[in-house]
Amino acid sequence: MQTLYTIEALEHNVKPGEETKILAQHLEQSRQLFVFLVWFLTEVARYAEVDARHRASKHLPSPEDRNVNTKISGNTLLWNILEHTSFQLAMAKDKPNLIDTEDWIRKIYQRLEESPLYQEYIKVQERTKDGEKDILEFIFTDLMLPDDDFVSFLEENFVHWDDDAEMMNLLMLGFLQKPKSYNFQEFLGKEKEQFAKDLLNTVLNKEAQLLEMINGRLVNWDAERIAVLDMILMKMGAAEFLYFETIPTKVTINEYIDLAKDYSTAQSGQFINGLLDNIHKDLVKQNLIHKTSHKN
């Protein structure tokens, strides 16, 4: 979707191969953002040791200063991430630590330290898989993402943050479930990356046919006045109906409704739902939709 929108905004015709280069650039930007977020999360968790050293080195440290609980710095999930070869390679390549984040890491950690969930976490001596995961999830979903100032910081350093925010949330939650299975060098995995390329090329190569389908069903609508993003989403959905036989039509419709709600206008979800549903019904009547099981 982002790539098609970028191509739509170009003042020149796309040269052969340019579309896949734009897609690759978008994927690389998203990968770098994800590496940064994972690194930042680990730094917040590890800051307990930094805080303990600072407090112990005071001129007159209090008993509390001498006994800062650093349990989270030994979080087993944290160290699964830090010792992950793929993550170490990404760190060496992307160098997220070069971004000035010291103040932000300290601020997020201080808010973590004050939270009831963290106080409960450090009271329990034993470590459980769920407990280790939950505290890292809490840092990301409850302390990092809801902080408007921190989000502004992300926007300043990653201009595509707004487009990728929802995806980053889903990726992080999935990553924390099984960090060792993630490959930071293959952001989407070969199968998903190939699907992205196939869908992009299909929408571009079959654009005339897709527009004919869409325009023929725009009752009381002027195609030129429809939001650019809405038209892109409709073309993508129609392309999946016709040319991607392993994607169930209900999945296609629901996915593009959600994308419209997240990225386009307030009315876009309902509009795209109605139009894709009409296209689907007409294609079924014409016996032009042929779906098969992904396993087959």
Image (cartoon, helix red, strand yellow):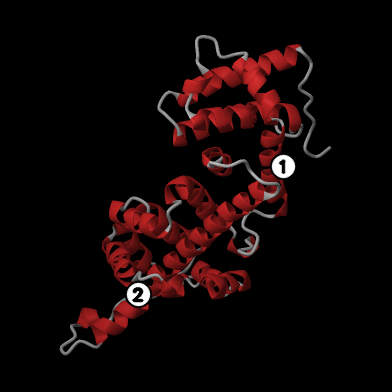
Kindly identify the residue that appears in the image at 57 percent across and 33 percent down.
Answer: 255
Above or below, 262 relative to 21: above
Q: Considering only vertical position in the picture, is 254 above or below 283?
A: below
Mark 2 packing: few (<14 Cα in 10 Å), some, or many (20+)? many
Residue 98 sits in quarter: bottom left
- Give the image location of residue 205, x and y in percent: 71, 35
Q: Is residue 153 visible?
A: yes
144 relative to 261 in the view: left or right: left
Dot 1 corresponds to which residue? Answer: 198
Residue at the image position 55 percent from the left and 27 percent from the top: 231
Q: Residue at x 44, y 61 (%)?
A: 136
Q: Earlier in the sequence, mark 2 or mark 1?
A: 2
Q: Give the residue pinned by disc 2.
A: 48
Outermost residue on the front side: it is 12
On the picture, is 148 further left or further right than 22? left
Most foreground residue, 274 or 239: 239
Q: Nearer the viewer, residue 141 or 233?
A: 233
Q: Which kind of residue does numbered mark 1 sit on?
A: Asp
Sort mark 1 into few (<14), some (14-19) or many (20+) by Cα contacts within 10 Å. Answer: some
What quarter of the picture does the C terminus occupy? top right
Which three-letter amino acid code belongs to the residue tagged 2? Answer: Ala
